[in-house]
Amino acid sequence: MYTMESIDKKIQILQDIINDSNSIVFFGGAGVSTESGIPDFRSTSGLYNQEWKYPPEQIVSRTFFNHKCSEFYKFYCQKMIALDAKPNSAHFKLAELEQKGKLSAIITQNIDGLHQAAGSKNVFELHGSVHRNFCVNCNSFYDASFILEQHKIDSDGIPHCTKCNHIVKPDVVLYEESLDNNTIDNSIKAISKADTLIIGGTSLVVYPASGLVRYFRGKNLVIINMSPTDYDKNSTLLIQGKIGEVLSRISVV
């Protein structure tokens, strides 16, 4: 456990790094949104450690969606859509860094849309978004509110397209599905051009998203996380702490 003095020193180093950087990229995971009340997956209180009729890892797979869609939507609507959640200090600080021309891109594993809600513009969502949902037949678009409402009123809990009556699927990447190639390409370009990469709130164990870090060739690799990652030994600066609490102490000039 770091002493307050060492944390203060590390945050000052982070401040200096940000001041000297011209193209920062932020790579974030579930830990960015836990401070907004959205549960993560792998912590002791995370979704993967909660009791369900089926293992959550199985529920969020494409096979499960195809064959047990009603059970999928029961879990998805209860645990993965959080429309009442609000951006926290991490989201707002990153948006401020972008507005000041310091941060060039956010690459996120989260599907909650809180970065955009805080004002960030250049956000690459590796695993999609709960705010985008499409009919599997005619590709008609539906928002998250439609999904929640239809889940409540439909007898089987499955949202159906109002135009062709086929199932509506969330634009989120399930297990057994591939990440969007365009999102991956844009993320690689952003990371490869960055002079500073800040990684926050992610264990970096989910592949292929975690593999994007190897494209970084810049000067400063900063990791802010509650638990160790495989990239800690390669970091310029390592801070053990909550991402929102750390970034809230950074001044943007």
Image (cartoon, rainbow, N blue to C red):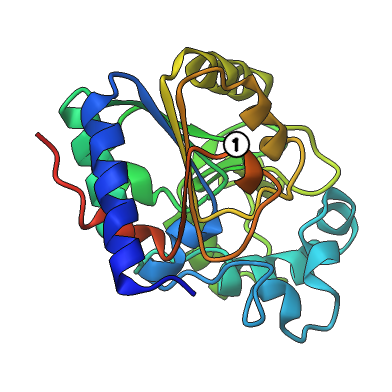
Task: Residue at 20% x, 22% y: name it.
Answer: 101
Could you tell me residue 94's position as x and y percent? 29, 42
User: Does residue 88 appear in the picture of this structure?
Assistant: no
Rendered position, 53 above or below 14: below
Task: Residue at 49% x, 37% y: name it.
Answer: 236
User: Does residue 246 appear in the picture of this structure?
Assistant: yes
Return the residue nearer the eye: 40 or 66: 40
Return the residue nearer the eye: 25 or 152: 25
Report the number of discs. Answer: 1
Other-residue count near label 1 (Cα within 10 Å), few / some / many at <14 / 14–19 / ≥20: many
Return the residue nearer the eye: 31 or 79: 31
Left or right: where 246 falls relative to 164 = left
Task: Residue at 43% x, 65% y: name it.
Answer: 241
Q: Amino acid at mark 1?
A: Leu
Could you tell me residue 245's position as x and y percent? 30, 64
Could you tell me residue 130's position as x and y percent? 52, 51
Rendered position, 221 above or below 229: above
Element at label 1: loop
Identify residue for label 1.
126
Give the quadrant of residue 64.
Answer: bottom right
Give the quadrant of residue 163.
Answer: top right
Left or right: where 175 falls relative to 23 = right
Task: Residue at 78% x, 33% y: name it.
Answer: 178
Rendered position, 151 above or below 128: below
Q: Dividing the image into 4 quarters, which one contains the C terminus?
A: top left
Could you tell me residue 3's position as x and y percent? 37, 73
